[in-house]
């Protein structure tokens, strides 16, 4: 008897579901950083399922989207925020601009790689995974007779001098994660040394993260450090490019959240549920989107060679990513990268070129004093303005923090002041390194 | 201070109205943003310490030098492009003058970031031209390397400012001046140097100072070319980076504003003490003469070379819009119409929005511009110069700053009946555009006003016309060339504005064309459709510009008798 009642209740509930689905209607405004290829494709499938809802995609760059939500919070008209970088959502969460939500769809694992898929506090949900890797233009590599790289360290080889592009970590949350991943994977000193060696081969540091795939696609430079879907979707659009994940990479969830005080909450909830459902996850495999679904079952429908982080356990798991460590020194890392690399790129490139030339001359010969000079030049380029301990120090970090502290909190020093101090040191180090390397070359 | 006399009440209330408009839509929003520059980052107290940091930071010093160098070089290159075009077309009987002048304006109606994309494909290190050079001669030319690229894109984009203003000025020079000079034995180069060029000076300086200012705080081009070490990109990068409300970005904004005002002031000083007005106002323009066959060929070669250069971004964009995959090759692999089909569904609304926004904004601009020019040059109201300075100050306000300022200031006010915050109502986009483009219209109107002698108005008043009648029957008709030049510049540039609109568009249905193109260009498969949309934008805005050009022409023919009639009254 009990069973029958339960069964009929269940049946009743089941008949209710479509009724609920039908009942949701109205306008759903989503602030998103995604390109039309992604938004239009998802929108089409979603609106077909919920004919009563009109989705309005408001496209803003991630950082502009955050500013927009912050500035419009007093009179909010947006329902959802939909973007890649988890730290963008952390900022909004910190400003108390997101709404908690419990997902009903099942079948989503807890983690992808070493990262939790959903925000442990329940504010934002991962709907896809993305990782950083290397993308290259096959025509370019062929014309310039360059080999295909396999790992990050390959990009530091002299053969790639002037052929690599990347965006600044201060401009792109996912680039920041790549920088941080390598620092955690290789250690503070070695990690920075590797980044500087790679940066010495840079053609450019772009201000927009899309500037990198754009440059590789059109052949302005040959190789780029990019997030996977940029590489995969460029390839799917017909460009002569290819992409790979190096062994040390981090998979990060791309996220969606409901904005606090959303005008149309039921529709927003329906959108999250749809995106995480089997149907929604399959849309991510569309050649124009090409993101890694978070539902492992979806991969059965993926094309051959499509990376599957749930099967290929090496993917994104090589580094045990320490989220707290990363969070504590977030702004300091950005600032260091900008001071040492972005804004001193010409000086760094000149020093790197001089060292590479001297080393090429040295190879096969033995000249102790030249070798010593080259060593010194390396040491000068690799010198860091602060230690790892200092970078994680709370008091020091507050100089770089966005939020104005209460008058009672004492902060000594200002960001511009600190950066100028670093810059003076970095600039003279690079110049000196170049001089030493040239001296060494003259001896050979 | 003596009380206002009766005939000053009208101008005074106009000035107050204008002042209020500028105060609400320019000063308050900007002040809300740059206030941060004067706050101590840790305590929030008022301080000047951030400015000290600015001047002690070598990165900012270098950025400042770079910005100045790029702006000055761009003025130089833009002048080299604009001088022959405007001189040939106003001075000689040249078939296709109208076409050349319209084509010359087309660079303005392409968003600079789109122009940069297509110039990279053509002139970049691995662009079409350099691939050919490398194949033929074994070397490449760094057209687009670093600051060179910015100078090239900027001067090609902004030279029409000089062209429009200079052509308007040349057209306004009275023939009799030239005739007198010739009667006195002057001709050729010396005639140009001593008579024509000095008389056209207000137009040239107006155009050149605009180019300087625009390049000095242009953001999109250096950003797209990944040149970071300039002031505007530094400000933008600082302000928009996640997690930085570092005051330096706001400090740079203040510096940009102050420096731009300073250079405007310098251009005022350069022109001060010189009277450019000529009394007679006959059939406008220089004497046109026919060219000898050899001269004609020479002129055509120069003009065609220049047009090829300035239209190369459009050529590149056209190829991009029809090409399938264009990657590390001289030309695309194959051609297709698909991109046009893809963008067509989303384009109609973008186009109508753009025409409405830019048209309204330009209309507001010429009305405000004419009024301000009149108040400044024809009345003696106290503080009238400030109207001019404040309105010109808008040129120095980066679009992002204005956008953020608007969101901050107007989000809390709901528009009655629509029940929407003012900051997300489409009208605010029109207001932002009109504020951003007001300086262009204003400069054109002021230049036109400076060329009209007060004697003409005095004559009208002596003959019994009142102020209003004088303004509408004498001043405005005589200024019509400048007013239309102002309208065209405002309209064309407003229709491709992006930085403020990017912040203010709150629903997709309110988006203008530039926003749509930008959106397309942010994905690998959207480059083609984005380029197709760009071509459509160029054609439509170009057609609108051409139409207004024709309108001026016909108007000028009607005007001459009207002026004569007005003079008779």
Image (spheres, coloured by chain):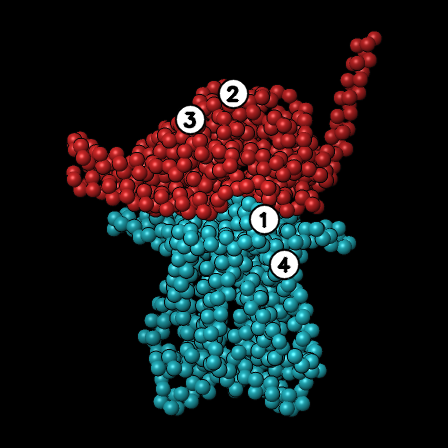
Chain colours: A red, B cyan
> Closest to the observer: B47 or A23?
B47
Q: Measure the alpha-carbon separation of dots 1 and 2.
A: 49 Å
- Crowd rating for badge 1 (residues with CA inside 10 Å; few <14, some 14–19, many 20+): some
Residue, x 45% and y 80% (percent of image)?
A: B199
Residue B189 % position (x, y)? 34, 80
Q: Secondary structure at mark 1?
A: loop
Which disc is residue A185 wearing? 3
| Res B68 quadrant in image | bottom left
Q: Image height check: is A330 above or below A435?
A: above
Q: Nearest the camera: B300 or B196? A: B196
Residue identifier under label 2 = A310
- In the image, residue B29 lies at what x, y percent? 62, 56
Q: Nearer the viewer, mark 3 or mark 2?
A: 3
Q: SS of the residue at dot 2? A: loop
Is B225 above or below relative to A409?
below
- Same subunit, labels 3 and 1: the answer reads no
- The relative height of residue B542 versus residue A63 in the rendered view (above or below) is below
> Could you tell me which secondary element the residue under label 4 belongs to?
helix
Q: Which mark is residue B44?
A: 1
Q: Residues within 10 Å of mark 4 (few under 14, many from 20)?
A: some
- CA distance for labels 3 and 2: 21 Å
> Could you tell me which quadrant the N terminus of chain B lies in?
bottom right
Seen at 56% across and 62% down, the residue is B394
Between disc 1 and disc 2, the foreground one is: 1
Q: What residue would you read off at disc 4?
A: B28
* Label at residue A337: none
Q: Secondary structure at mark 3?
A: helix
């Amino acid at each position: 008897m009990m069973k029958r009642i339960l069964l009929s209740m269940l049946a009743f509930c089941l008949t209710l579901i479509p009724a609920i689905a039908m009942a949701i209607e109205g306008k759903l405004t989503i602030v998103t950083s995604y390109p039309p290829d992604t938004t239009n494709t998802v929108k089409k499938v979603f609106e077909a399922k919920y004919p009563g809802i009109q989705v309005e995609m408001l496209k803003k760059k991630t950082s502009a989207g955050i500013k927009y939500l912050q500035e419009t919070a007093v009179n909010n008209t947006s329902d959802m925020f939909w973007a890649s970088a988890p730290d963008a959502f952390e900022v909004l969460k910190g400003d108390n601009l997101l709404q908690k939500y419990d997902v009903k769809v099942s079948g989503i694992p807890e983690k992808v790689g070493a990262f939790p898929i959903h925000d442990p506090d329940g504010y934002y949900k991962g709907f896809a995974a993305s990782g950083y890797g290397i993308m290259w233009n096959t025509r370019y590599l062929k014309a310039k007779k360059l080999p295909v790289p396999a790992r990050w360290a390959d990009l530091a080889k002299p053969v790639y001098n002037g052929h690599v592009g990347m965006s600044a970590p201060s401009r792109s949350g996912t680039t920041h994660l790549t920088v941080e991943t390598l620092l955690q994977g290789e250690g503070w000193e070695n990690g920075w040394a590797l980044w500087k060696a790679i940066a010495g081969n840079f053609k450019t540091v772009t201000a927009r993260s899309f500037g990198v795939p754009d440059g590789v696609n059109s052949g302005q430079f040959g190789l780029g450090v990019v997030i996977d879907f940029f590489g995969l979707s460029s390839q799917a659009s017909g460009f002569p490019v290819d992409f790979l994940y190096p062994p040390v990479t981090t998979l990060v969830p791309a996220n969606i959240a409901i904005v606090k005080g959303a005008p149309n909450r039921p529709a927003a909830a329906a959108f999250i549920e749809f995106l995480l459902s089997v149907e929604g996850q399959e849309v991510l495999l569309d050649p124009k989107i090409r993101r890694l679904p978070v539902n492992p079952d979806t991969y059965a429908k993926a094309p051959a060679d499509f990376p599957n982080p749930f099967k290929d356990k090496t993917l994104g798991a090589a580094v045990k990513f320490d989220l707290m460590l990363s969070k504590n020194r977030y702004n300091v890392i950005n600032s260091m990268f900008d001071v040492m690399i972005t804004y001193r790129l010409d000086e760094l490139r000149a020093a790197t070129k001089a060292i590479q030339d001297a080393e090429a001359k040295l190879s096969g010969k033995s000249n102790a004093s030249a070798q010593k000079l080259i060593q010194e030049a390396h040491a000068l380029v690799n010198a860091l303005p602060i230690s790892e301990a200092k970078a994680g120090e709370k008091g020091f970090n507050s100089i770089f923090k966005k939020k104005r502290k209460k008058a009672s909190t004492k902060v000594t020093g200002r960001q511009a002041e600190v950066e100028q101090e670093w810059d003076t040191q970095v600039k003279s180090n690079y110049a000196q390194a170049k001089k030493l390397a040239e001296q060494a070359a003259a001896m050979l | 201070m003596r009380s206002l006399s009766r005939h000053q009440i009208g101008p005074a209330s106009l000035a107050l109205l204008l002042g209020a408009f500028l105060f609400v839509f320019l000063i308050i929003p900007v002040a809300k943003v740059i206030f941060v520059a004067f706050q101590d980052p840790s305590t929030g107290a008022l301080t000047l310490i951030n400015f000290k940091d600015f001047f002690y930071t070598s990165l900012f010093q270098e950025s400042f030098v770079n910005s100045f160098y790029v702006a000055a070089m761009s003025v130089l290159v833009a002048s080299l492009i604009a001088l022959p075009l405007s001189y040939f077309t106003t001075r000689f009987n040249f078939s296709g003058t109208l076409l050349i002048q319209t084509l010359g304006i087309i660079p303005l109606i392409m968003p600079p970031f789109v122009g940069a994309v297509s110039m990279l494909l053509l002139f970049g290190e691995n662009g079409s031209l350099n691939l050919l050079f490398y194949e033929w001669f074994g070397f490449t030319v760094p057209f687009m390397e670093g600051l060179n690229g910015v100078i090239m894109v900027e001067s090609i984009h902004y030279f029409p400012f000089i062209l429009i203003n200079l052509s308007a000025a040349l057209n306004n020079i009275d023939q009799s001046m030239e005739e007198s000079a010739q009667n006195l034995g002057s001709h050729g180069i010396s005639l140009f140097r001593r008579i024509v060029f000095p008389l056209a000076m207000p137009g040239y300086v107006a155009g050149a100072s605009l180019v300087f200012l625009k390049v000095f705080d242009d953001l999109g081009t250096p950003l797209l070319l990944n040149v970071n070490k300039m002031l505007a990109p530094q400000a933008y990068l600082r302000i928009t980076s996640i997690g930085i409300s570092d005051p330096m970005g706001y400090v740079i904004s203040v510096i940009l504003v102050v420096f731009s005002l300073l250079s405007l002031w310098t251009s005022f000083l350069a022109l001060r003490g010189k009277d450019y007005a000529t009394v007679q106002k006959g059939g406008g323009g220089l004497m046109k003469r026919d060219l000898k066959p050899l001269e004609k060929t020479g002129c055509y070669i120069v003009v065609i070379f220049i047009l090829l250069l300035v239209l190369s971004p459009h050529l590149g964009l056209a190829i991009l819009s029809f090409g399938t995959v264009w990657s590390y090759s001289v030309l695309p692999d194959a051609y297709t119409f698909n991109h046009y089909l893809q963008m067509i569904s989303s384009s109609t609304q973008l186009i109508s929005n753009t025409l409405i926004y830019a048209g309204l904004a330009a209309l507001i601009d010429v009305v405000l511009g004419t009024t301000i020019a009149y108040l400044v040059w024809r009345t003696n109201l106290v503080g009238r110069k400030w109207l001019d300075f404040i309105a010109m100050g808008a040129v120095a306000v980066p679009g992002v700053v204005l956008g953020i300022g608007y969101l901050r200031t107007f989000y809390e006010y709901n528009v009655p009946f629509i029940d929407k915050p003012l900051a997300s109502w489409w009208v605010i986009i029109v207001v932002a555009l009109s504020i951003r483009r007001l300086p262009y219209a204003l400069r054109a109107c002021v230049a036109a006003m400076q060329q009209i002698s007060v004697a003409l108005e005095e004559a009208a008043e002596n003959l019994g016309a009142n102020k209003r009648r004088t303004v509408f029957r004498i001043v405005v008709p005589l200024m019509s060339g400048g007013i239309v030049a102002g309208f065209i510049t405002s309209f064309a540039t407003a229709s491709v504005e992006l930085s403020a609109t990017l912040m203010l568009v709150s629903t997709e249905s309110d988006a203008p064309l530039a926003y749509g193109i930008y959106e397309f260009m942010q994905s690998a498969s959207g480059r083609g459709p984005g380029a197709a949309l760009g071509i459509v934008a160029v054609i439509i805005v170009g057609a609108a510009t051409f139409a207004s050009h024709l309108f001026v022409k016909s108007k000028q023919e009607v005007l001459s008798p009207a002026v004569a009639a007005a003079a008779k009254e």
